[in-house]
Amino acid sequence: MRLAWRRPGTGSIRSGPRSTDGTAGDRPPGHDCDGDAAPGVGRASPILSTRERWAGRKESSMRRSWNWSLVAVLLTVGIALGLGVGSLDAQQKNLLVSKKVGAPPPMDPAMGEAWKDAQPLTFKVLGGKNLPGGSTEVTLRSVYTGDTVYFLVQYKDPTESFRRGPWVKQADGSWQQLKDPDDKGGDNNKYYEDKMAMIWNISSPAFEARGCMAACHTGEGKPFGNKYLPNPGERADIWHWKSVRTGSVGQFDDQYLDATRYDKDKAPEAGRKSDPKTGGGYADNVGDDKKGPKWALPGNKPAPPYWIVDAEKTPLDDSKYKAGDEVPGIIVAPFTGDRGDISVKSAWKEGTWTLVFARRLVTGSDFDVQFNDMKKEYAFGVAVFDNAQVRHAYSPGVLKLRFE
C-alpha cells in the first residue's frame, strides 16, 4: 500500500513531506523515487486489523477537525483585523488589489483617510546589506482613478541615509570626498542613500513565472552580480526611487531591463538601462580638476541638505568653509520626458519610510508597463536598499497587481 500525506490547508495529496528548502515532492526516508517503500525498510502491509482501521479513521477524523478549526481561527483573526476573507485570500496569493476611487488620494506620506479602504499586501524582503538581519517588512497599498494608478509603500529602516558621497573640507584646506573603504567598484554601502525599486514584467515569460529571480545573476565580474532577462526581445519596467538623487525632486527614476549581457567595456550595466529623457536628471558635483566640488548650496552654506538643486546651484567660494564642513556631492533636477513619468512624495519618520507615488495607467512608451487591461494580473517584484548602492533586499517569488 502506498502511504500518502496531506499538506495542511490544501486538498492535494503528496507522497512525501515538503522539504525544508520549500520544494515539494521529496519522499520520506526509505522510499524510492516512486514513493514505494524500499526493500528491507518496513513496507506497509495492505491488510489492516479492525483496531488499526478504527485508529486510522479516528486519526483522519481528528485531522479533518483540526484543519477546519485552523481555517475558522484564521478567518476569525482576519475579520477581527479588518482584513476580510478576500484580503486573506489576496495575502496568501501575494496579490496586491488596486480598487477604483472617485478622486485621487493626496500625494502626502501621512497615511490619511484616502487609504483607509485600500487593501494592504505585506511581505518580507530578504538578503539586504545594512538592514537588521538583512530583512525588513514591506506593506503596499494601491488605488486607481480613470487614468492614474497610485501606490503607498511603507517599510522599516532604522536609519535615514542621505550622506551620499559628500565633500569634506580638510584642515590643510584641501577637499576629500567620503567613500566606502571596502568599495571595490560600484558597491558603496557606507556613504550612499536609501532606495526602493519595483520591477514590472512587460514581456518576459521567465519573469512572469519566477519574478526577479529571472533577472538577477550573481558573479559575472561584479561584487553583487548583474541584472538582465533571459532572452533577446524581452523587457521589464524598473521604477527606481533614489531618496537623494530623485526623491529630492519628487520623482522615481524610470528605467527598464532587457537581455543585454554584461560586458566590462560595452555594457557595464548589463541589461539595466534608463528611459529616454529630454532634460533634467542628476550629476556629480566635481570641479574641473577633480580635486573638490564645483558648486555649492545657496549662500555657500554647508550641508545638509546633501543635494544641490540645479536651478539653485552657486559657484563654490572656498573661503566660506572651515575644516569639517561638508558640501553635497550631487546636483539634482527633475527629469523631463519618458524618464520622469513617476511622481513621488516620501518621508522617513521614527524608523519607517513612507512613499506615495503615481503613474499614468497608460504612457504609450515601449519602455513602460502599460496597465491597459483591467482583467489582467501584472507581475512585479520589490527591492529595498538600506544605504546600499546595489546590495538590496529582494521579494522572493512573484507578486501580482490586480485591478478591481
Image: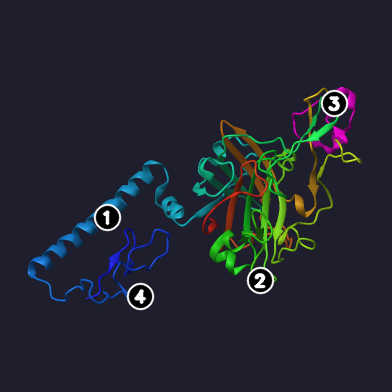
Give the number of the mark in front: 1 or 3.
3
Please tell me the numbered disc located at residue 33: 4
**How far apart are labels 1 and 2 at the CA level?**
45 Å
Residue under circle 2? 231
Mark 4 touching mark 2, by CB under 8 A? Answer: no
Q: Position of residue 194 (x, y in %)?
A: 65, 41
Residue that protrudes farthest toward the left in the picture: 50
Q: Image height check: is 228 above or below 143?
A: below
Q: Is residue 5 left or right of residue 90?
A: left
First in sequence: mark 1 vs mark 3: 1
Residue sitting at 37 percent across and 67 percent down? 26
Q: Earlier in the sequence, mark 3 or mark 4?
A: 4
Q: Nearer the viewer, residue 201 or 370?
A: 201
Task: Report x, y in % for residue 273.
Answer: 74, 58
Residue 378 visible, this angle: no
Which amino acid type is shown beneath numbered disc 3? Asp
Which is more N-terminal, label 2 or label 3?
3
Label 2: which secondary element: loop
Q: How many other residues sit within 10 Å of disc 4, few (<14), some (14-19) or many (≥20)? A: few
Which tag, 4 or 2, sits closer to the chain's start?
4
On screen, residue 208 above or below 105: below
Name the residue tied to disc 1: 68
Tell me where the magenta segment starts and ends, as one range.
Answer: 293-321
Q: Indicate the amino acid at tag 4.
A: Cys
Nearest to N terminus: mark 1 or mark 4:
4
Between marks 3 and 4, how big is the CA–CA gap? 73 Å
Give the Cα distance between marks 3 and 2. 54 Å
Tag 1: amino acid: Trp
Q: Look at the numbered disc 4 and give the secondary structure of its residue.
A: loop
Residue labelled with disc 3: 172
